[in-house]
Image (cartoon, grey):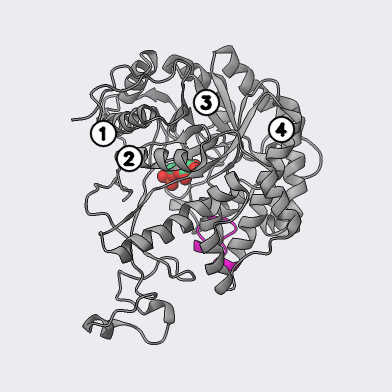
Amino acid sequence: MYYDKLKDFPPNFLWGAASAAYQVEGAYAEDGKGPSIWDTYAHTPGNTFKGTTGDVAIDHYHHMAEDVGLMAKLGLKAYRFSVAWSRVIPDGEGAVNPAGLDFYRRLIAELRKNGIEPVLTLYHWDLPQALQDKYGGWESRAVIPAFAKYCRTLFEAFGDSVKYWVTMNEQNVFTGMGYRWGNHPPKVQDVRRMYAANHIVNLANATAINLFHELVPSGLIGPSFGYGPVYPLTGDPNDVLAALNADDFNNNWWLDVYCRGEYPYFMRQQLTRAGLMPEVTDADDQLLKSAKPDFLGINYYHGGTVQQNRLEKPVQDAEQKDFSATDPYLMQPKGEQAQNPEVPMFNSVSNPYLQKTDWGWEIDPVGFRVALRQVYEKYRLPLFVTENGLGAKDELVDGQVNDDYRIAYLEDHVRTMKEAITDGVDLIGYCAWSFSDILSWLNGYRKRYGFVFVDRDDDSAKDLRRIPKKSFTWYHDLIQTNGAAIQPGK
Ligand code: BGP
């Protein structure tokens, strides 16, 4: 659909920005906070870029009032942040730490005072280390009641002052990185364990949603999912089929559970054949079916492009001589190896039509519209964009950061979001990633996303001065005018 004029953003649209506790707070062992799996992981040499950690991060814990002051200056209508579970319950399941709870109470009050809607994420990857040590973390169902207790504590403390709640942040990412690729804690590389842990996270998610609906009937809750549309590389029906597989594998495996309470049918068959399907009891089925999110959080950075996997359709031509005969999952020419070897359903490839960021992430604003349309068409839940942004190597020159490339990126994405609204998507808000520069999990402090530059680098916390970038003024004006100037692209 092409338009001459786009619909306005809804009058109460939540223009926001986002962060996560480990990436901003610092104060990692202060005021009674217990260690999280990210503290342990980042303290272990070799795990993160230049050994960077969130020990100090941007010290938001001690700069909270100043940061909220800047958010107010920016004109934010919403601020998405996460609570560090081990700040509130240091060992994950025992006594509540009043000082930890108090930090978030003060943050929420400060936001409210400035007319900013708090959007609270319950779990942004920093599981209390004690639960990892005692139970094996998300691989044990014992974590579910611990999570429920933590959620109850927050629902009771902040149910009156926070309307929007996010359960799990990017469950697909933290289970994949943590259990498939082994480059996030707990640093496991075992897909069977990944599917098992992921199922337990699903149960915890459903438990939290049901508890929330009981305790905070006036609030709204949903998970934030890292969604990317999947394109076939060509019109070859085999590539189209591969894209269908990848969509199940990358998206539906989570979204169907969140919204329909069941795993997608074909992929379940595939995992069962591969001996990887997690154990799902009748009680699990009932629990998953009973928990309905009120909205879906969508984190959008890029999609993916795939082609047929040659394992499912072995090539007959001369290329075959390059194949290794020893490993059944490496029977492909280099560069075409299945990226998900236990489920040979597709190969991920680079998209020839798209530019990439400094970090090789494809830049695809149209894919944003595709994403919003696909998810809304399928699940008909209000959508809330809880992350979207550009990671770049910003430079402070003469006290200024001229991040025109970020403005261009964001404007293109806001435009396609407005097109999606004109298409009919019910969108309640947009939180850019991120409010200020923060720690990037594996890329330290040089991969910057914020509207506010923070003067620190990978080697030193320096003076942590906050300096609004050029994009700060751009976003301010966009919010003031509710995006009125954004019109269809050429
Ligand atoms: C998402 C996470 C965020 C954030 C963002 C950017 O997956 O939810 O926490 O980190 O990606 O990622 P990165 O810092 O790796 O560029």
Q: Could you tell which of marks 4 and 3 lies nearer the N-terminus?
A: 3
Q: Could you tell which of marks 3 and 2 lies nearer the N-terminus?
A: 3
Q: Nearer the viewer, residue 323 or 230?
A: 230
Front label number (3 vs 2)? 3
Does the magenta-highlighted stretch encompass residue 109?
Answer: no
Inter-mark Cα distance, 3 to 1: 23 Å
Give the residue type at disc 1.
Tyr
Check disc 2 and report the residue beneath it: 392
Q: Could you tell which of marks 2 and 1 lies nearer the N-terminus?
A: 2
Give the residue type at disc 4.
His
**Residue 405, which numbered label?**
1
253 to 423, vertically: above or below:
below
Q: Nearer the viewer, residue 168 or 216?
A: 216
Q: At which x and y percent is residue 186?
A: 60, 58
Check disc 4 and report the residue beneath it: 213
Q: Quadrant of the N terminus?
A: top left
SS class of the residue under badge 2? loop
Front label number (4 vs 3)? 4
Inter-mark Cα distance, 4 to 3: 22 Å
- Please give the name of the residue rendered at 41% of the width and 65% of the height, measured from the top-left corner: 339
Give the residue type at disc 3.
Tyr
Instruction: Identify the magenta region.
Output: 180-192
Inter-mark Cα distance, 2 to 4: 40 Å
- Please give the name of the residue rendered at 59% of the width and 47% of the height, measured from the top-left corner: 260
| Drawn side of residue 160 relative to residue 401, left or right | right
Check disc 3 and report the residue beneath it: 79
